[in-house]
């Protein structure tokens, strides 16, 4: 799935850094999608944007929440908690060598990978809401395209 957005107000084709990197490689799905969009919007410029997570995405996913979740879903050897504490720099091994904690983003990535069901639940829930927003945006875009076509027909 590509992450390309049409911004009609700014007349830009927007994509995040990861999508832009893939789109720069000939033959990838992202490359093909970008070419289709450029054909559909030839006057729009392509822009790479830094996208922040959508509002509410994994809201409340604090270290405290992760610890409670790990305790409730860990195996009997507490292997996930050991990994978590190692990443936080709080395990005995980490403290013995003076290892610093990894960044929140890295720990969050590990958490979502280690507990896939958690991430999938939130992702699926967000998709449900995004589908509604996408339908509204598409209807608005269709309306704008229809107005543009009518204006062009008057000029011709």
Image: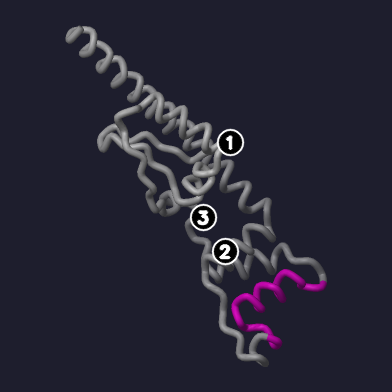
Disc on res. 27: 1
Residue at which label 2 appears: 108
Q: CA distance from mark 1 to mark 3?
A: 33 Å
Mark nearer the N terminus (3 vs 2)? 3
Residue 79 lies in the magenta-colored region: yes
Quadrant in the rendering for residue 142: top left
Q: Residue furthest left?
A: 155
| Nearer the camera: disc 3 or disc 2 | 2
The numbered dot on residue 58 is 3
Element type at mark 3: loop
Magenta segment: 77-93
Q: Nearer the viewer, mark 1 or mark 2?
A: 1
Residue 138 percent across, percent down from the top left: 40, 25
Relative to 18, say whether 88 is above or below: below
Of the two numbered discs 1 and 3 in the rendering, the one whose residue sits closer to the viewer: 1
Residue at horizontal 68 percent and vertical 53 percent from the top: 116
Dot 1 or dot 2: first in sequence order is 1
Lateral position of residue 81 relative to residue 76, left or right:
left
On the image, which quarter does residue 140 sit in?
A: top left
């Amino acid at each position: 799935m590509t992450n390309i957005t049409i911004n009609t107000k700014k007349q830009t084709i927007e994509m995040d850094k990861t999508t832009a990197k893939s789109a720069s490689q000939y033959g990838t799905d992202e490359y093909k999608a970008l070419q289709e969009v450029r054909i559909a919007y030839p006057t729009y410029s392509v822009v790479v944007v830094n996208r922040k997570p959508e509002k509410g995405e994994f809201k409340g996913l604090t270290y405290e929440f992760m610890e409670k979740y790990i305790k409730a879903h860990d195996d009997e050897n507490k292997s996930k908690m050991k990994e978590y504490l190692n990443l936080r720099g709080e395990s005995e091994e980490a403290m013995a060598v003076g290892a610093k904690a990894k960044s929140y983003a890295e720990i969050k990535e590990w958490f979502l990978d280690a507990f896939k069901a958690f991430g999938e639940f939130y992702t699926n829930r967000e998709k449900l809401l995004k589908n509604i927003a996408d339908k509204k945006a598409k209807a608005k875009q269709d309306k704008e395209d229809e107005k543009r076509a009518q204006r062009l027909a008057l000029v011709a």
